[in-house]
Amino acid sequence: MKGAVTPFTEPLLELFFRALSDEGAEVQSNAAFATGVLVENSTIDLSPQYLHLLTALQPLFVVAPDAPAPKQNARDNAVGAVARCITRNTTAVPLDQVLPIFVEALPLQSDLLENAPVFRAIFHLFQTNSSSITPYMDRLLQVFAHVLDPNHDQEQVNASIRAQLIQLIQMLNQQDPAKIQAAGLSAFA
């Protein structure tokens, strides 16, 4: 529907907020995904709702490593929703509070399709607000190495994201080649 969802934004957002607190992990997962897509596509500026939305998404980030797949999927969709908020209106996101949780939830484990909005948000932050993301560089380099590792069963990122990621690594290599080498990313520099 893309922007055609706009007339339904407010009732859908109310529904998604209720679904985010549902007991079922699959319902939470779908609500997190739908909320992010709504933020991304509605022509209504939902940034006044970001704090409420981030609060509703936060419990989905707390997932045990051995949690069932629906719980992990809900976390990945919550990460994607936060990424969409960052990309849509960075200034409305309290990055100092959000980025530690966001970055710690990476790499995604279950819903790899959410890597697209996640990496769009990371690229966006490097381009527009690099000082906000710099403190997480070591962790991000680990994530980059993970998603570029050819030994994974599934492709972690599509060709476009992969190309942009390699460009970013090359730029970072110019600034600190030792850090890129230590992360095992020299082949991409």
Image (cartoon, grey):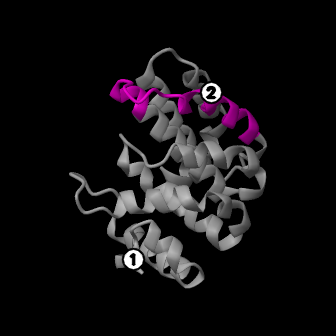
169 in the magenta segment: no
Name which quarter of the figure residue 43 lies in: bottom right
Of labels 2 and 1, earlier in sequence is: 2
Choose between 5 and 88: the one closer to the eye.
Answer: 88
Residue 96 spot, x, y in % from top left: 75, 49
Residue 95 spot, x, y in % from top left: 73, 51
Residue 74 spot, x, y in % from top left: 46, 32
> Residue drawn 56% across and 67% down?
123
Residue 56 spot, x, y in % from top left: 65, 29
The secondary structure making up most of the magenta span is helix
Q: Look at label 1 and name its amino acid.
A: Ser
Q: Look at label 2 and name its amino acid.
A: Phe
Mark linked to residue 155: none
Circle 1 is placed at which residue position?
A: 186
69 in the magenta segment: yes
Identify the element where label 1 is drawn: helix
Circle 1 residues within 10 Å: few <14, some 14–19, many ≥20: some
**Relative to 5, residue 127 above or below:** below
Circle 2 is placed at which residue position?
A: 17
**Relative to 150, residue 42 above or below:** above
For residue 134, side relative to residue 108 (left or right)? right
Choose between 17 and 75: the one closer to the eye.
Answer: 75
> Residue drawn 52% across and 35% down?
32
Residue 21 visible? The answer is yes
> Magenta segment, which residues?
49-72
User: Outermost residue toward the bottom?
Assistant: 174
For residue 22, side relative to residue 110 (left or right)? right
Tag 2 near tag 1, CB within 8 Å = no
